[in-house]
């Protein structure tokens, strides 16, 4: 069996490496390579450097298509990308199946599906259309994302989403599409066998992980922590770093920016903290939340539909009803009540182990391949 995996539009293997995500993003496919005879071709948006980065995986062929997109103009780049399927179709003539894990760039495997008559899986980690509306993108961008979602639904052989909320929303928005089943494939976590002692962790430091962007709502967290002795540690980079640092100073909140970390280092870093905060204005099915819970962190999350699919209030974490509800009150309460903290921490880890493990997702992934190829 030979499968072509298409990277997210404009993303290269080098981007995974630089951001520290290479080990996480490759893990599922690494497991498949170790346990089966399946071969992969990765279509990336990088240069020949991507071939070198992925060279340790002998059964992965790499087609870097970045050389075909040379303009800096977004419209011209998109037009250039439309010709990529015609340039690489000969290299993919012997594949059995195509897959992409994001909508951005899905037009390339869709065109190839029409050219090669091969089955196509499209899986999304978040609802791109919904995000563009919430981010108040231009009407042209929203229309583009609507049409991209529509054509992806129409031309994919299987369409997967990572959350029940996304599934319900898409079924409602695209109810006129008949005989199209959208299925749930949640994110997974490579769960460590051992976990640091949860009672020996930092009590006065809390962890956040994510891009330093408006969506992640860092300034509301800082405002909430103002007047406390709590220290905020942030893993991630982004354009708002200076603004967040200045806002922390204005509100007398100590902030440590830890930059980007290799994923293996990040998994160990979770184990240093008792509390993990996710305060996003909106989210997909957040991997960082699952990773933190798998390491026994008690999550404190701002209420949203997708997050509530993972966190149950006072059972696997704490759900705050509004941005103004006190974080410090909950942290103080759980620091003082060891039994309550232990209970929620163990529940959080157990949920991830039993529901979102890599092993479970691996079995489902392989079955999806088999179902389509033998169809």
Image: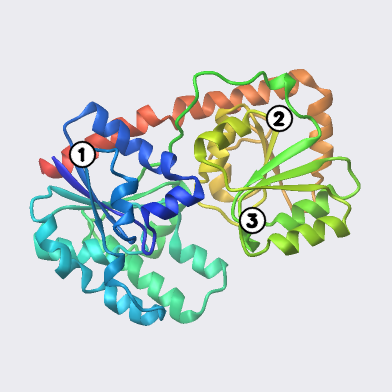
Q: Judge whether 186 appears above or below 213 on screen.
A: above
Query: In the image, is 136 to the left or to the right of 28?
Result: right
Q: In the structure shown, which secondary structural element does the residue marked by tag 3 occupy?
A: helix
Asked whether residue 177 appears in the rendered view, the answer is: no
Determine the residue positioned at 28% across, 43% down: 55
Q: Are marks 1 and 3 in contact (CB under 8 Å)?
A: no
Residue 229 x/y as whole percent: 88, 40
Report which residue position mark 3 lands on: 216
Query: Which quadrant of the figure has residue 109?
Result: bottom left
Closest to the observer, 280 or 108: 108
- The answer for how far apart the CA atoms under marks 1 and 3 are is 38 Å
Determine the residue positioned at 45% across, 46% down: 163
Image quadrant containing the N terminus: top left
Report which residue position mark 1 lands on: 59
Residue count near mark 2 (Cα–Cα under 10 Å), binned few <14, some 14–19, many ≥20: many
Query: Which quadrant of the figure has residue 250?
Result: bottom right
- The answer for how far apart the CA atoms under marks 3 and 2 are is 20 Å
Q: In the structure shown, which secondary structural element does the residue marked by tag 2 occupy?
A: loop
Q: Are marks 1 and 2 in contact (CB under 8 Å)?
A: no
- The answer for how far apart the CA atoms under marks 1 and 2 are is 40 Å
Determine the residue positioned at 87% across, 56% down: 251
Mark 1 and mark 2 lie on one chain; the one further toward the N terminus is 1
Report which residue position mark 2 lands on: 274
Query: In the image, is 300 to the left or to the right of 169?
Result: right
Task: Determine which of the numbered discs, if any, sits on residue 289 in the image.
Answer: none
Query: In the image, is 204 to the left or to the right of 52?
Result: right
Q: Judge whether 85 appears above or below 102 on screen.
A: below
């Amino acid at each position: 069996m030979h499968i072509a995996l298409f990277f997210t539009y404009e993303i290269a293997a080098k981007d995974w490496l630089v951001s520290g995500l290479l080990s996480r993003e490759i893990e599922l496919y690494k497991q498949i390579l170790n346990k089966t005879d399946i071969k992969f071709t990765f279509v990336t948006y990088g240069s020949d450097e991507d071939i070198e980065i992925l060279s340790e995986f002998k059964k992965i062929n790499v087609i870097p298509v970045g050389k075909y997109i040379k303009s800096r103009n977004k419209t011209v780049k998109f037009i250039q990308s439309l010709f990529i399927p015609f340039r690489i179709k000969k290299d993919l003539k012997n594949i059995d199946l195509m897959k992409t894990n994001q909508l951005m760039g899905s037009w390339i495997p869709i065109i190839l599906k029409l050219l090669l008559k091969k089955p196509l899986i499209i899986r999304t980690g978040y609802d791109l259309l919904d995000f563009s509306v919430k981010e108040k993108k231009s009407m042209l961008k929203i229309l583009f994302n609507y049409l991209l979602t529509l054509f992806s639904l129409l031309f994919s052989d299987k369409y997967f989403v990572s959350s029940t909320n996304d599934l319900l929303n898409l079924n409602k928005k695209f109810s006129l599409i008949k005989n199209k089943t959208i299925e749930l494939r949640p994110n997974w976590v490579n769960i460590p066998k051992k976990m640091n002692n949860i009672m020996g962790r930092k009590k006065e430091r809390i962890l956040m992980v994510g891009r330093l962007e408006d969506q992640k709502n860092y300034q509301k967290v800082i405002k909430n922590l103002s007047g406390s002795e709590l220290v905020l540690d942030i893993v991630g980079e982004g354009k708002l770093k200076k603004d967040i640092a200045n806002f922390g100073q204005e509100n007398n909140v100590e902030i440590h920016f830890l930059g980007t970390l290799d994923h293996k280092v990040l998994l160990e870093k979770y184990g240093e903290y008792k509390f993990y905060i996710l305060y996003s204005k909106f989210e997909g099915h957040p991997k960082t939340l699952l990773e933190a819970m798998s390491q026994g962190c008690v999550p404190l999350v701002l209420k949203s539909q997708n997050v509530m699919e993972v966190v149950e209030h006072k059972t696997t974490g704490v759900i705050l009803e509004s941005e103004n509800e006190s974080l410090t009150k909950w942290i103080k309460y759980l620091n003082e009540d060891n039994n309550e903290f232990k209970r929620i921490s163990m529940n959080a880890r157990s949920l991830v182990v039993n529901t979102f493990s890599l092993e479970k997702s691996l079995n489902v992934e392989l079955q999806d391949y088999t179902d389509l190829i033998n169809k």
